[in-house]
Image (tube, grey):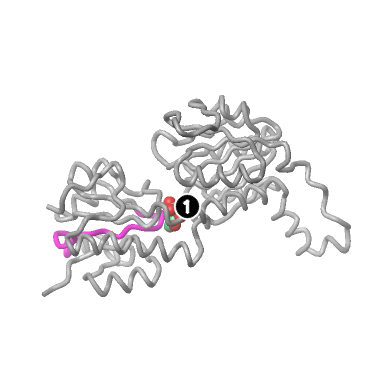
Amino acid sequence: MSKPTVLMTAGLMRMIQDQLEQNFDVHRLDKAPDQEALLSEIGDKVIGVCHGGHSMHVDAAMMDRLPNLKLVSNFGVGYDGVDTSAARERNIVVTNTPDVLTEEVADTALGLLIMTVRELAQARDYLLAGRWAKEGDYRLTPHSLRDRSVGIIGLGRIGKAIATRCEAFGLPISYLGRNKQPDVAYEYYSDPVALAEAVDTLICVTPGTAETQDMVNAAVLKALGSRGILINVSRGSVVDEKALKAALKDQTIAAAGLDVMVGEPNIDLELMTFDNMVLLPHVASASVHTRNQMGQLTVDNLLALKDGTDPLSPVPETPFKAWS
Ligand code: 8YV
């Protein structure tokens, strides 16, 4: 019996590809010399898409080329690369990889926060440039985690794990979300400017959607103020980068730490020119431990389709009913 067909949109970890190849007839769309030709050749056989990376989008046009598609298994908790409305209209289930990366991303967010506030990347560069012996100690940092208050934009699973860590650091916490969460004691804000006014440290961990596009804009940065520190571990789209560059240049805010940027990996190179910015190449979940768990969940959702069992982690926009 021939294996069911799965389309991969990007090169992912070997353990994903190996397991998929054992169970499916796997095609790599990103590797196809002619993607249109590949879609014409195998499009009607594809029942599952394994989606990862940030360059391709699984949109309505792609789904239309895959008339028998039942599942898009997204490698990552954020599924902004998949059009969930188009999927729902076509009875396609979308799954993601929640929970298994929560603690890792929260750890990285705190790491990036401390790096940014205490200039740890800059201090390391100072040492490696041989300046310590020549010029003396690195400067005392003007900012510290002491006496700070944190506003978390998006208090979901990862946001809560970040909040728990911040609490352990003795930092008071406020949050922004669509709704006030009844079982949460942190101060609630529905308006990003009001949140930024109330705190001096903003941590973005909200999904990248049309609603959150450029949510951290010039007005929010102004409200955050000259002691302000911005950390983003969500999606580049949540921060208006033009406004951020202006705010860092004229010291409207003190500093920023970004793990995510617009256009990854081909980011705005000007972002690299700021002394008061720490940049990471989207590594928040990137340990072998966590990526293996994310990879396994990505595979297991596709295996559920093959075996006719319930998917493990459908996203709320495309709730699972039955494999029809
Ligand atoms: C992913 C992420 O691993 O889970 C997410 O939403 O941003 C990362 O942790 C990354 O998208 C994989 O490319």
Task: Residue 241: give x, y in percent of width and height.
Answer: 55, 40
Task: Residue 44: give x, y in percent of width and height.
Answer: 14, 59
Q: Is residue 43 magenta?
A: yes
The quadrant the N terminus occupies is: bottom left
Question: Against 10, is 164 above or below?
Answer: above
The residue under the point 16% across, 64% down is: 41
Within 10 Å of disc 1 (Cα), the crowding (few <14, some 14-19, many 20+) is many
Mark 1: amino acid: Thr
Question: Against 164, is 223 above or below?
Answer: above
Q: Which residues are magenta?
A: 40-56
The residue under the point 54% across, 37% down is: 152
Q: Is residue 156 magenta?
A: no
Q: Which sits in the foreground, 241 or 221?
A: 221
* Residue 282 visible somewhere in the drawing: no
The residue under the point 42% across, 53% down is: 99
Give the labeled residue for mark 1: 102
Task: Residue 56: give x, y in percent of width and height.
Answer: 35, 54
